[in-house]
Each structure stands twice: as structure tokens, then as C-alpha cells.
């Protein structure tokens, strides 16, 4: 199977439109249609349902997509094998939970790009740890990064980890931030904003905070649960609410004076930002560059 045709298939699947895919690939619409038809004939199954002006993957197309990604990745790895590793060229795909995607990677990746300007980065966001690990095992992404309890996963290598400090925080206008020492029940006296999506969601606050509250005999519940830690920060920046968040998510706003710490007894959340990759994958030059980068100390600076 030609890598060129697999790449065409992936672009059509991504855009859901043959005309748009042809434009981005620099082909004619007729050429793209012919490639897809050739691929469907070769595989013996329809890969797309034609829906008006667009297309949508069939079940067979969804199953084939992971093979197409592996084929394209393998081709890129082969092309990169003999290149100068001091200046790697190629694609690097990182998928991260929203907290590191918003709070950590925007600070790290510009520095990475300065060091390795010819690596093309793709950053995706997913809230589900199980999905992230599955994609690592399927080789559809190069690295997964998320907050969770310290863990290991079959078929995956942990490239790096850092413990995360969680802090109670509120808008700086909240009088509670002016007190020298506050009890946990006092914090919950006013609107407390937390996050909960599912038991698999990366670093959701309910899974972090609820066990601590129960262990210490506190019958306390948040006033509002919202989708992500980033959404909680937006709530607080509107001037109301209190929460319990990874410090890196709020440190910049604390320094700006928009948010302030609530001074209470520290809570060990037992959570780590962790980076994983597939244990069976050949480490291409762009992956090695990222490993060298995060192991150089930059991963723990923010």
C-alpha cells in the first residue's frame, strides 16, 4: 500500500470533505477521489459514507484509520532514520489533559521550538486518561501527558513525572484570602467550585479532594461542578468562587494579583503530571529530541 494514498485517506477523514482535502494536499478533486476508490477496492470495503457535500468514516474506515496512521508514522520514521539528529525534522504529536495543555505546555513548547525549529508540533487535548493511554498503545500519538495518581501502564514507558502541589485559591477580592489561617469548613462556607467528569478524567478535583474530606471527617460538598480545571480558573477570574487547583494553573494569576492563596493546612493531593510513550516504538529523532528536552530539567521549572 502506498504511503501517499494512506496520507490522502487521513486528510479526507480529518476534514470530512474531498474538495478541502484536495486543496490542502495540492491535488485535484478527481485525483483524491480516485485514490480513495483505489484504496477501497484494494481493501474490499467502503471507507466513507458520502453525505451531501461531505464524507464520514464508515465503521471499516474508523478501524482502518489506526493502520493508516501507523503506516504514515513508519514511513516518516524511516525517512528520519538517516537524518542529522542534531537538527531533527518531522512531526511530533502530543496529546494532553486540559490542565497541562493550558497550564504547562504553552510555557514549554516555545522553548522546544527554539531548540528544534524543524519539528512540526501537534498538540491535542483529551480529558480521559484511558483514551490517552489507549492512543499511546495504538501508536496514534507520540506522547501522552496528564495529571493522575502515580501509575504505570502495560505497553507504555513513563518518560517523566513531576509531583503537583494543589492549593486553595480565590479571587484576591475575597476577604478569606486576607486571613492568616483558615479551616477547611470556612473555605466551603462560600461558593466552592470543583470539577468532575468521570472517574477516568485526568486530575478531576472531586477524585482528589473528596477522599481527603472524608478521611478527615468533613461532610462538605462543592457548590458547583464544572468540566475542567481551566474552566474553574475562568470562574474565579470573574471575581467569585473558591477552589482547589494545581498551583501551576493559577501561579501566573497569583503573581498578577487577580487570584490569591487561601492560607490553610496543606493537602497532599498525591497527583503527578506524567508523560508516557509506547514501549515498543522506535524512538525517532523528533521523539528523542522531546525526551532530551523534558529530561533536561525544563519539565520541572514551571
Image: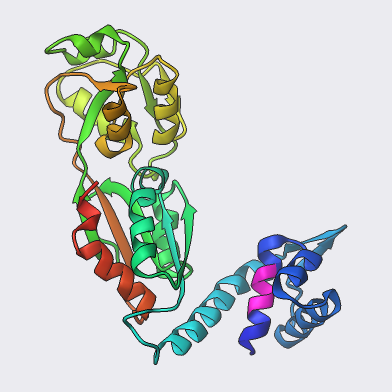
Q: How is the image coloured?
A: rainbow
Quadrant location of the N terminus? Answer: bottom right
Residue 194, given in percent of the width and then of the height, sits at: 37, 26
Instruction: Give the quadrant of residue 282.
Output: bottom left
Q: Is residue 112 above or below residue 40?
A: above
Q: Is residue 221 above or below residue 300?
A: above
- Identify the residue at image location x=29%, y=62%: 153
Instruction: Give the quadrant of residue 195.
Output: top left
Q: Nearer the viewer, residue 2 or 263?
A: 263
- Identify the residue at image location x=76%, y=64%: 20
Residue 291, given in percent of the width and then of the height, sits at: 28, 69
Instruction: Give the quadrant of residue 203.
Output: top left
Classified by dominant secondary structure, the portion drawn in magenta counts as helix
- Identify the residue at image location x=42%, y=69%: 117
Residue sitting farthest toward the bottom: 82
* Left or right side of 149 for 223: right
Q: Nearer the viewer, residue 283 or 50?
A: 283
Q: Is residue 295 above or below residue 161?
A: below
- Identify the residue at image location x=24%, y=24%: 168
Residue extent of the magenta highlight:
7-11
Residue 221, given in percent of the width and then of the height, sits at: 33, 18
* Left or right side of 28 for 2: left
Q: How many marks?
A: 0
Q: Nearer the viewer, residue 131 or 228?
A: 228
Q: Is residue 190 magenta?
A: no
Residue 137, given in percent of the width and then of the height, sits at: 40, 69
* Left or right side of 194 for 51: right
Amino acid at each position: 500500500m502506498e504511503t501517499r494514498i494512506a496520507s490522502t485517506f487521513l486528510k479526507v477523514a480529518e476534514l470530512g470533505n474531498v474538495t478541502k482535502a484536495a486543496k490542502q494536499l495540492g491535488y485535484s478533486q478527481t485525483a483524491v477521489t480516485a485514490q480513495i476508490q483505489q484504496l477501497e477496492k484494494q481493501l474490499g470495503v467502503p471507507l466513507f459514507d458520502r453525505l451531501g457535500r461531505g464524507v464520514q468514516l464508515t465503521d471499516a474506515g474508523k478501524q482502518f484509520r489506526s493502520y493508516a496512521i501507523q503506516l504514515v508514522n513508519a514511513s516518516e520514521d524511516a525517512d528520519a532514520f538517516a537524518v542529522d539528529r542534531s537538527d531533527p525534522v518531522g512531526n511530533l504529536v502530543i496529546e494532553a489533559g486540559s490542565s497541562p495543555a493550558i497550564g504547562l505546555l504553552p510555557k514549554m513548547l516555545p522553548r522546544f521550538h527554539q531548540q528544534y525549529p524543524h519539528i512540526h508540533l501537534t498538540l491535542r487535548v483529551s480529558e480521559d486518561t484511558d483514551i490517552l493511554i489507549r492512543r499511546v498503545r495504538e501508536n496514534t500519538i507520540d506522547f501522552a501527558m496528564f495529571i493522575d495518581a502515580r501509575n504505570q501502564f502495560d505497553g507504555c514507558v513513563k518518560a517523566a513525572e513531576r509531583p503537583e502541589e494543589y492549593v486553595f485559591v480565590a479571587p484576591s477580592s475575597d476577604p478569606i484570602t486576607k486571613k492568616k489561617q483558615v479551616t477547611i469548613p470556612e473555605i466551603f462556607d462560600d461558593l466552592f467550585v470543583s470539577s468532575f467528569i468521570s472517574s477516568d478524567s485526568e486530575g478531576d478535583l472531586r477524585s482528589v479532594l473528596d477522599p481527603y474530606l472524608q478521611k478527615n471527617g468533613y461532610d462538605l460538598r462543592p457548590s458547583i461542578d464544572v468540566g475542567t480545571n481551566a474552566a474553574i480558573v475562568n470562574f474565579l477570574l470573574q471575581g467569585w468562587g473558591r477552589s482547589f487547583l494545581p498551583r501551576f494553573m493559577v501561579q501566573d494569576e497569583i503573581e498578577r494579583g487577580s487570584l490569591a492563596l487561601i492560607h490553610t493546612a496543606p493537602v497532599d493531593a498525591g497527583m503527578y503530571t506524567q508523560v508516557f510513550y509506547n514501549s515498543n516504538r522506535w524512538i525517532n529523532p523528533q521523539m528523542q529530541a522531546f525526551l532530551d528536552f523534558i529530561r533536561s530539567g525544563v519539565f520541572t521549572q514551571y
